[in-house]
Image: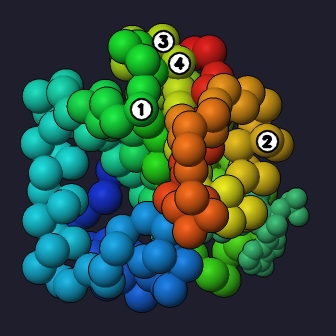
Amino acid sequence: MRITLRALTRQDVEAHNAGEDEHIVRWLTGRYGTVQSTADHFDRLADNARAGRGKRGFGVFLDDRLAGYVDCDPDARDGLEPGDVNISYAVHPWARGQGVAGEAVRLMCEYMREHRIGRRAAIRVYPENRASVRVAEKGGFTYVADPLSGTDKKPEEDSIAILLYVHDL
Ligand SMILES: CC(C)(COP(=O)(O)OP(=O)(O)OC[C@H]1O[C@@H](n2cnc3c(N)ncnc32)[C@H](O)[C@@H]1OP(=O)(O)O)[C@@H](O)C(=O)NCCC(=O)NCCS
């Protein structure tokens, strides 16, 4: 099993959209992409890569087939300390359960080190998203805080608590 990160192009739009499912929409994107919205997203990533700023994202390829997506976003600040850079990821349903996300995160951390993007990689995850919590744990990320713990949280607000995991780069 060979996992690589590659820049996404218009040719990947169809496979990218076909790989989205309800879990990706629920935990990551909030809605299904269209041909246009995904193409626009890939164009923005290409612009950012050229300019060396903003969100940097890649396709995750498993033996040359598009199997997921990973990005890092130095502009995402919510709940993060200066120097923390958020990583997001998704794996297409057919490729899950083989450690693809963990390897994608590892490769993204390598890229961030190489390009001096941040001091720590951060994964923010809803506690109910057990698969993603496992990715953070198995990747050696350290649990830092539940930003809402210690406050007067009502039971119905539990679902909005976000766990923060970090890893030195
Ligand atoms: C979270 C996600 C990226 C994990 O990708 P992955 O490559 O399957 O990760 P792993 O193979 O390391 O599996 C992680 C956990 O997923 C669960 N899992 C295992 N096989 C699975 C399968 N076939 N289908 C779904 N989940 C599975 C297990 O709980 C596993 O933990 P374990 O290794 O302790 O058993 C993937 O489930 C996904 O795309 N989810 C929707 C988007 C998302 O949640 N992104 C993260 C936002 S913070």
Q: Label 4, secondary structure: give it.
A: strand
Q: CA distance from mark 2 to mark 1?
A: 19 Å
Q: Is residue 79 left or right of residue 151?
A: left
Q: CA distance from mark 2 to mark 4?
A: 15 Å
Mark 4 neighbour class, 10 Å CA radius: few under 14, some 14 to 19, many 20 or more: many
Tell me, yes or no, if residue 128 can be seen here. yes
Look at mark 4 in the image and give the residue it sits on.
120
On-image quarter of the C terminus: top right
Q: Are marks 1 and 3 in contact (CB under 8 Å)?
A: no
Q: Amino acid at mark 4?
A: Arg
Q: Label 2, secondary structure: give it.
A: helix
Q: Are marks 4 and 3 in contact (CB under 8 Å)?
A: yes
Q: Position of residue 157 (x, y in %)?
A: 53, 61
Which numbered mark, 4 or 1, is in the foreground of this view?
A: 1
Mark 3 neighbour class, 10 Å CA radius: few under 14, some 14 to 19, many 20 or more: some
Q: Which disc number belongs to residue 137?
A: 2
Q: Amino acid at mark 1?
A: Gly
Please report whichever mark, 2 or 4, sits nearer to the chain's N-terminal start.
4
Please report whichever mark, 2 or 3, sits nearer to the chain's N-terminal start.
3
Q: Compared with residue 166, is residue 42 higher up or lower down, i.e. above or below? A: below
Q: Are marks 2 and 1 in contact (CB under 8 Å)?
A: no
